[in-house]
Amino acid sequence: MNENIRIAGLTALALLIGTTAVHAQVGTLTGTRQIEDRIEDVEDDVQDDLEEAEDPYRFGNPEFRPGFSGSASLGYSGTDGNTEEQNLTIGARLRHAQGPFVQNLGVVLDYSETDGDSDQEDIFMVYEGNYYFNESFYAFVLGRAEFNGLADDPDASGELAGVPLADRVKTDGFIGIGPGYRVVNRQDMTWRVQAGVGLSYLEFGDDRDETETGYIASSRFYYRFNENVFLTNDTDVLNSDEALRVNNDFGVNFKMTDAFSTRVSYLTDYNEAREIRTDNKLGVSLVYGF
């Protein structure tokens, strides 16, 4: 395995033309708009980090609306003048729930070009299916695929410029299946483990491909000390002919007040195929509102 619209009403439109357009022009020239956008990005990233620790899968078998549900988003920008650029991003999330069987599918498409030449043609897909036999025992299927449409283009620009075709990953796919079990399932503490067998497929820019079988195991632990403090410890292990890889994400969330929340995390990544086998990363996410 490889390392890895908006529709506005007439009032809103008038407001947009009368005020926002002027602000956007001034903000672009002075740099304030870029700073505001960056602040929003930081806030979104931190909030995601805090919320992911309490995903619904930690607490028993999550109940979803029967049938199909989901969301889709699209972002486009285009410029002309000194440089002609186009950027398109499409994302979709689809869920289907029927009785004990819950399936999730996510797709992202990234495309960009400069002066008529493609800079990025990427597609990302992920699938997850869970069948719950009872409150404790379930079976899972995990699938992931990434496609780089420029990997076999010897004249590709951007990040691929100068990279040999043999070192470019054109297709990166993985599928794994196995059983899972909830060892503990209380309001203050949950722990589930799962293990199975997986198959990965890599295709490179020179049309060479590799297939590898691996064994996967995961642990998801959650413990709440009180209504303001809880910790999580997520572990993933992958063992294959190529190497043993272990990823562990330990984090503690604190809600000091209604306005102040923080998460401290420590991520450990081990890969025995590397010269320096272990990488560690300390992260601090903080949200304060006033």
Image (spheres, rainbow, N blue to C red):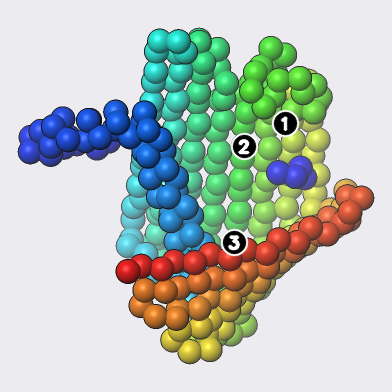
Q: Is residue 207 left or right of residue 54?
A: right
Q: Secondary structure at mark 2?
A: strand
Residue at mark 1 to residue at mark 2: CA–CA distance: 9 Å
Q: Earlier in the sequence, mark 3 or mark 1?
A: 3
Residue with the mark numbered 1: 169
Whether tag 1 and tag 2 are in contact, CB under 8 A, the answer is yes
Residue in the foreground of this view, choosing between 119 and 243: 119
Residue type highlighted by circle 1: Val
Residue with the mark numbered 2: 146
Q: Earlier in the sequence, mark 1 or mark 2?
A: 2
Q: Is residue 278 left or right of residue 122?
A: right
Residue in the foreground of this view, choosing between 98 and 249: 249
Whether tag 3 and tag 1 are in contact, CB under 8 A, the answer is no
Residue with the mark numbered 3: 140
Residue type highlighted by circle 2: Glu
Q: Residue furthest toward the right?
A: 275
